[in-house]
Amino acid sequence: MPNFRVAIHATVSMLARMKFLKVSYPTVLLLCAFLSSALRAQEAKAPATSHHTLWKVQGKQATVYLLGSVHALQEKDYPLPSVIETAFTNSRIVAFETDIGELESPALGMKMLSKSQLPEGQTLENVLSPEIYKDFMKHAEDSGTPSMMVERMKPAMAAMTLEIFELLKMGMNPQYGVDKHFYPLAQSAGKEILPLETVDYQLDLVTGFSKEEGELLMKSTLKEIDNIKKDLGELIKAWREGDADKLQKLMNDAMADSPLIYKRLLTDRNHNWVPKIEQLVRGDKNAIIIVGAGHLVGKEGVVELLKKDGLKVTQE
């Protein structure tokens, strides 16, 4: 059974970028009971490619790698290409979007459960427009998302929950996400593990939307779900081949209709991370930064922001 608390940091990423490339990785304990029967296996392996969703930033003493994560993959996507595994092996520091270890805390699970709920007496039907609510319930029914689970959730959390069920239905699983893959390896290798954000920050981010923002986010999410059903193969192919332009188009351009939410979930966070990454570049230990692929691409992606600051960034 998937540990669904691990998906909370995918929550933010998933909500920001076609949802399987991380909310996020973001997500309540109740979800665990419904997920075990939804897993599938992948049918084919990826072909060899000369580029990857991996960049290298060269400092005076340290090399810092930027790895674009997919927060939900399939078992047969492993092993990852050797260039990615080598970048990890050569790094003494591993930075993730948030503290993955803290996601295992039972106390966090209870906090997530509490903060995901609407105020007493309110339901999704009360806070969403009739049109959006009807569309959401249709998607929920089609994906097998239990209505009793989401009816009192805040819109952002309900949207994320729906998308996790959609991903599982398509054979994707957060248990096989790239960050989930590397976290225990970093622990067993005794690497220094750093979070770029706190878990509380991410939780507040996805539970702190206003009623109007929740409506916009839900509308955008439902549109993205329809797109991802059509574009899943293209998205995975673009990630495997390191096609930054295609990733930007398929993931981040979908948020163009909601610029304020796009800024809050994606670009603001990119800007917040850059000083922390640059500090690692100025250090003396090799490091690998593992974040959702959508954070690395585009004009306001981490790669371009680092280049604007004069750093040499090359794609592997």
Image (spheres, rainbow, N blue to C red):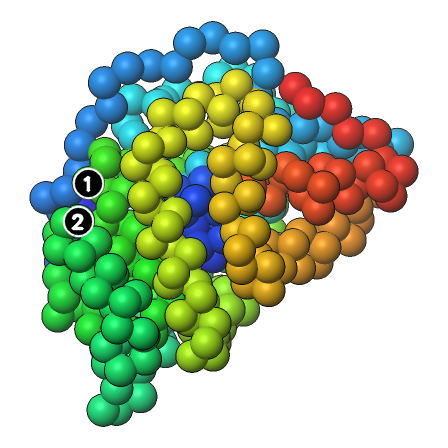
Q: Position of residue 8 (x, y in %)?
A: 39, 58
Q: Position of residue 132 (x, y in %)?
A: 30, 66
Disc on the earlier residue, 2 or 1: 2
The residue carrying mark 2 is: 143
Q: Residue furthest front?
A: 131
The residue carrying mark 1 is: 169
Residue type pointed to by label 2: Ser
* Callout 2 secondary element: helix
**Position above or below: 49 against 227:** above
Q: Position of residue 214 (x, y in %)?
A: 42, 71
Q: Residue furthest bottom?
A: 121
Residue type pointed to by label 1: Lys
Q: Nearer the viewer, residue 10 or 287?
A: 10
Are there few (<14), some (14-19), or many (20+) residues within 10 Å of tag 1? some
Q: Relative to residue 262, is residue 231 drawn left or right?
A: left
Are there few (<14), some (14-19), or many (20+) residues within 10 Å of tag 2? some
- Which residue is rendered at x = 56% and y = 51% of the image? 256
Q: Nearer the viewer, residue 16 or 92?
A: 16
- Which residue is rendered at x = 33% and y = 54% of the image? 222
Which image quarter is the C terminus in?
Answer: top right
